[in-house]
Image: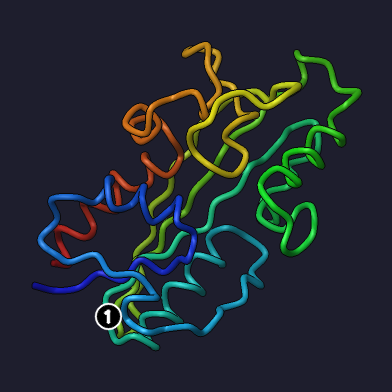
Amino acid sequence: MRKLLLATNNQGKIREYQHLLQGLPCELVTLAEVGVDAMVEEEGASLEENARLKATAYAALSRLLTLADDSGLEVDALGGEPGVRSARYAGNGASDRERIDYLLARLADVPEAKRQARFRCVIAIATPKGEVKLSEGECQGVITFAPRGEEGFGYDPVFYLPERGKTVAELTPEEKNQISHRGRAAQEARQILERLL
């Protein structure tokens, strides 16, 4: 069976992709499982550039079909920040809680009606020969004034979904995978992978 490398060390993302891609005719493997410990710097100016950069670099290193993504939170009141810098928004090495606290501090004076945001995800699937296919997903919401919920990771506890009446961190993993930016991008990625496999 062919292997598909999930090019991330983020355990939350790995769990989500294991669920989102189950049933495909391939074995999902991680960087650690194939012994790749090189770090690919996310130096791109967009989610698309970073996803493509990671997928092609790890496909070349591993000689495996590789899936990488880059995702980000875009807050309208902050001019689209943190965007491509979402993971590094509060500085390199900051915890999820520190990033959330920094975001909420930046939005302290912004009223509820102006706290619209979106999660975006771009998935790149690269072959060892350097061929790349992209898919994209988006999820609209509002930033809360305080974290709520224990599920998920990253900014999920402050990303409120008005139509559900919950933050993403209050959804079950199954609910999140149906409506999340990563879930939507993965639906298209599945179709690409089915053709490639």
Is residue 118 placed above or below 60 in the rendered structure?
above
Residue 120 position by quadrant = top right
x, y percent for residue 71: 54, 51
Count of picture labels: 1
**Which residue is under mark 1?**
64
x, y percent for residue 125: 34, 66
Image quadrant in which the C terminus is located:
bottom left
Q: Residue at x 52, y 58 (%)?
A: 70
Q: Which color scheme is applied?
A: rainbow
Farthest residue in the right direction?
109
Is residue 136 placed above or below 158 in the rendered structure?
below
Question: 195 left or right of 43?
Answer: left
Q: Residue at x 42, y 78 (%)?
A: 56
Farthest residue in the front direction?
150
Residue 34 position by quadrant = bottom left
Question: 56 left or right of 43?
Answer: left
Question: 9 left or right of 195?
Answer: right
Residue 149 versus residue 92: which sits nearer the camera?
149
Q: Amino acid at mark 1?
A: Leu
Residue 172 versus residue 181: which sits nearer the camera?
172
Image quadrant in which the N terminus is located:
bottom left
Q: Residue at x 76, y 14 (%)?
A: 112
Q: Residue at x 79, y 38 (%)?
A: 101
Residue 132 position by quadrant = bottom left
Residue 110 versus residue 191: which sits nearer the camera?
110
- The crowding category of the residue bearing disc 1, from other C-alpha atoms within 10 Å (few below 14, some 14 to 19, many at least 20), is many
x, y percent for residue 180: 43, 35
x, y percent for residue 25: 10, 61
Q: Disc 1 on helix, strand or loop?
A: loop
Question: 5 left or right of 97?
Answer: left
